[in-house]
Structures are given as structure tokens and as C-alpha cells.
Amino acid sequence: MGLVIQYIWVKNYRCLKNYEVNFTNRVKFHYNEELHQIECLETNPNYIEGFHSKQIDFTCVVGRNGAGKTTLLRLIKDIFTRRYGRFPENCIAISFDGTKYYADYLFSEEELRLDSTYNNLEISNIKEYHAAERMRCIYYSAHFEQFQYRQPWGNDDLSTSKLLYKIKDYNEESGHDRVVLFFQEEFSKQITFIHDYGEKVKLFSLNYPPYVTASFLFEEQYFKEWCSKNWENKFDTVDLNDMIMRFLTIHVNSHIDAFKEHCAKALFLNAIYRIGHTVYNYKQDKELLYYMMKCRQKNIFQSVLSFFTDKDFWDNPQNIMMLPYRDKYIRFLEYIDSLSNEMAKIHPLYPTPTHSDPFFIIPTKISSVEDEDLPKDSIPHDIQQFFSEYKEVADFHDFLYFSWGLSSGEQSILNIMARLYSKCTRSEENGPHYLFDTDQGEKSEDDAILLLDEIDDYLHPKWQSQLIKSLIKFIESVYSTTHVHIILTTHSPIMLSDVPKQNTILVGGEQSQFDETFAANIYSLYNRSFFLDEGCVGSFAAQVIQDLTKKIEDYKPEDDKWIEERLTIIGDKFMRSFLTREYLKQKRKYNFSEQSMTELELIQRVHQLEKENQRLSEENANLKGT
């Protein structure tokens, strides 16, 4: 086995105060702060080594919201991140290499020295020897958090916050859009992963998407407003409308023409959007408008190409700032033109598209241009080739929207795997993938920690049930020569049921209160592992059940409809049956009570009438006697 984390103690780290944790129950360490001594409280001879995989050790972190699960991952990151690490003061970290334990520590009082009662533990002050530097630490989180945004952890931080903050080609002065570049980098990672693995992604419970759909994003309204603002009665209104229509209206006879026209239109509107938001001033805008009128041609593609190649306009020194972008736009138009010519050779009889929302299909991977299986809506280049051309001109503002056609759950899994895959390489084209050593180039890392923060977010229970198995297969494949200690946080009892108690941490509770988790009943896990003391139904449902119970106890006939409506929608059969019996019981009791009261009144009335009859008889007898 490789190197794993066994134990951490920290004096004060955010919400963790005098906090200690053993990541497995292989052994149980405890730090005696008074004696500055690490004690081994117990060992577990029944610990199952390599339970999930010989290459992978696993730790699952669960607990209440706000207990410190994510904070624990951040603490691990600070301790074990090579070069970027900020080993906290008053902290101890113990790792295990399969034979011996190693303790690193740092105290604010330098004269303090750590001792241990455990013979198989080697202790080193962090200033003398840092065993934690042997482990590569990679962190993943899909959440966007302001704290992480400004405090990234180097290149192995794959959190959304870090990736958005540290965009590779971002240049604020050039008008780059950070969010646009972030999505393009994410999509590039996904393309590389799917392109390299092909249909083998099915091994990781992902459907292989054979095509990408590219939809056009047109900034027509902005273009019209920009033109109207800069017109200022310099030209006739009829000319303005004619020019706008020349650059916006598509009239074509074939699918290939439509593809060229839509691309040219979207590119042109993107360029105007960029010009209007960055380098041009008001005077230059009006000049630009004049040259746009001059460059009108019979179709959009020719009009746009004529505009970007007009020497009179672009040779003007005032426009020098736009030249780099102009050259990119021309190259993309030339690429689209050559692509259209290839399409015409393969399928010369493309029909005119009938769909109202223009889009086109890009194959994920093409073995040859002559592939007869290409759909009629597809282009003869794969997504990797097309996207590399596209992102050269879309660094400021996107004009195409790309979709794999995956569900949101599949997309979440693809995001995780694509980011993790971006950290690996392979020495030969068909050789095994491995996690490369950042210090020694092509050499593979021996040991790594993979921190995954709540990766079950957005996932349907079906995907949650498959995620750990898929993740293990994925890591074994892409980090094939590295021993990996995976530490993940989760709120999913389904995922927790894939992890034995020996590899589970309960944050904010006593580990002893844990029952066995592996293959456990989901209902039991919800109650005991996720602190649902009030049961496993929502608070609103619990309140309705409470109100229903009260109505049944205080039964009145006028409540029949309200009670019966709610009884019929209770999903738990036992609860519905129990409350229904109680309801019928109270109803019978009430009706019997009402019936008994009626009979009593009748008897009393009979007695009254008998007494009245006797009184009248006596009065009548008295009258006769007189």
C-alpha cells in the first residue's frame, strides 16, 4: 500500500477547536496536550486493508450542517499541499505507509517537543523533515465560495472558485470575460477526456455522447441599438434599415449556405458587441458604421468578410488596437469557408434547414472525413478541432452554445472526471494514464490525497448509488501508478452505504454512536448518521401529521372532509393504516355517544309525560268528586 493520512490534531482552525480525528480505525491515536504526548489508545486487528481497492484507500466524512466537514478538508489541504501548504501552528499530522507511522508537527512555542508512547511512530518537527510533502494533494469542489475565490491553493486546486479566479488567458485590459473563459476551459477539459477515452467512458457510468449540439447566440437587439445610437441623421433612415437587414437577414438555398451565413452573422454580431464595449470611442463608432454600409454584399458571409478585409478602414492608425481581433475573425471566416467546402464534397445535396432555432451537429470524434455515418446536420470536423478554432475568436463573448445532450446528473459526473483527468498524462499514445509528478516532469506520483467536497450535489439517487464504484474505476484507470487516499464529504446515505464504518468519520458527534454503515438500511443511516432525530419526513409533513392526529383525537363531524383528504395522501402505509384506524375508532365513539344521549333524552321525556299524565288524572278525579 502507499502513504495515507491516519490522524490530525489541531488547536484552533476556524470552527475546529482542540479537534482530533482518526481517518480509519486501523489504530486510534490521541494527543495528550498536557504531556505533549501522542498515545495509541487501541489497534484494530480486524481492520480490512484495501477494502475498496489495492490502489485506493477511502474515507467518508459525514455530519451535521455547519459541523466542519468542508473545514476539515481545508485543514488537510493546508497541511499536505506541496509548496502551497500553510502548515497551521499547533497542529499534528500522522501518516502511514503500510509499515510505519510518521508524525509531523508545528507548535507556536518552538521549544516544545512531541513525544509518543507508541513504538511504531516516527516523530519529526516540520522544520526538520516534512513527511507530508511526499503526498500530492488535489482538491475538488463544484461550489463557488467567496473565501476560496481569493485564496486558491495552487494548480492542484480544482474547485470552481479557484478555476474561475485563476483563468489561464485572462487579461482584464483586453476586455476578456472571465466567466466566458472559465466555461471554455471547462468544456476543453471535457472534450479532452471524452475524446481520449471514447466509448470507454461507459465504464464510469457515463453515456458516451457521439455528438455535440452547437446553437447560435445572436446579439441582434444590441446591434440595432448600437446602429441607431450612432446614426445621428448622418444617413437616411431607409439606408440604416437596409444595412441592418443586410447583416441580419439570411436567404439561402442549402444547409451548407445556412451554416456559413449563421456563423458569419453570429461572428459579426459578436465583433460589434466587443467593439461597443471595449476599444472604440463614439467618433470611431460612426466611422465604423460608414464602412459597414460600404461593405454590404449580397449575403451576410460576403458582407462580413468584406468588412473585415477593407483596407481603407483597417489601415487607419486609429484602428490599430482592433487589428489582432480583426485577424482572428478573418481566420475563423476562412476556416468556416473551408469547412463548408468539405461539407459540400461529402454531402452535396444537403437540404435547407427547417428548424427555427439554428444549430448544427459536431461529431465527438471522427476516424475519417469520408465517414458515411455522419448525420446530415453534422460538420466533418470533430469537436476538438472545431472548438480550438472557435475559442480563438470567442474570448470576449460567446456566440455559440455547446451541449453534450447529457442530463444534469451526468453533466455533474462529467465535470468531476474531466477536472481530475486534466491532472494526468501518458508517455505513449496508447499507454496507461498516470498522475504526473509536478516536480519531476514525466515521472509518476507515488502517493496522492484526493479531497472531494460534497460531490453528490445535484445527483439523482440512482447516480449516487453508482458514484463511488464509478469513481474507484476512474481513479484506477487515470491515476494508474499512484496510490490515492480519497477523502470525501457527503450528505447521501446511499453513498455512505458503500463505505464501511472503519473508513467513516462522524464530524460533530461521537464515533462510538455509529453502527455499521456498509450495505446498511438507508432509513437507519438517515436517522443515525445524519442526525435526523425527528424522523425521515420533511418538517412540513411532520406538522401536518401532528395537526391530523390532534383533529382525530378531538373528533368533530365537520372535520371529516379535512381528515379524510389528508389520510389518503400519506405515503407510509403503516402510518396511514394506524391513523385511519384511530379516526374510525374516534368516529364510532362519537356516534355512539350521540346515540346514547338521544335515547336518554327520550326516556326522560317519557318519564316527564307519565308524570304529567298522572297529575292530570288526579286532577280529573278530584273534579269528578266535587
Image (cartoon, helix red, strand yellow):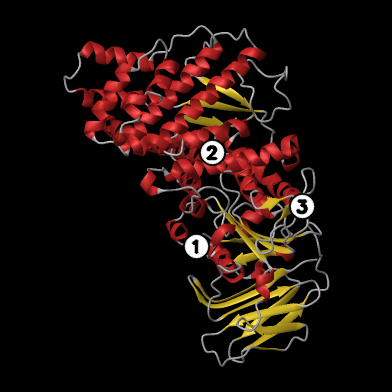
Tell me where residue 274 appears, x and y as whole percent. Answer: 36, 34
Tell me where residue 482 appears, x and y as whole percent. Answer: 75, 59
Q: Quadrant of the C terminus?
A: top left
Q: Nearer the viewer, residue 605 or 11?
A: 11
- Residue 84 can be seen, yes or no: yes
Alpha-carbon span between mark 2 and mark 3:
66 Å
Tell me the mark number nearer the camera, choosing from 2 and 1. Answer: 1
Alpha-carbon span between mark 2 and mark 1:
50 Å
Q: Secondary structure at mark 1?
A: loop
Mark number, residue 66:
1
Picture quadrant of residue 127: bottom right
- Residue receiving disc 2: 588
- Residue 585 can be seen, yes or no: no
Category of crowding for the residue at label 1, using alpha-carbon neighbours closer than 10 angstroms: few (below 14), some (14–19), many (at least 20): few
In the displayed structure, 179 sits above or below 41; it is above
Q: Nearer the viewer, residue 457 or 178?
A: 178
Q: Residue furthest left?
A: 233
- Residue receiving disc 3: 476
Q: Earlier in the sequence, mark 2 or mark 3?
A: 3
Q: Name the residue: 29% across, 12% down.
A: 242
Q: Amino acid at mark 2?
A: Arg
Q: Name the residue: 32% across, 21% down.
A: 292
Q: Amino acid at mark 1?
A: Gly
Q: Nearer the viewer, residue 326 or 409?
A: 326
Q: Earlier in the sequence, mark 2 or mark 1?
A: 1
Q: Secondary structure at mark 3?
A: helix
Tell me where residue 514 appears, x and y as whole percent. Answer: 67, 65
Q: Nearer the viewer, residue 26 or 315?
A: 315
Report whether 53 appears left or right of 169.
Answer: right
Q: Name the residue: 75% across, 64% down.
A: 446
Q: Are marks 2 and 1 in contact (CB under 8 Å)?
A: no
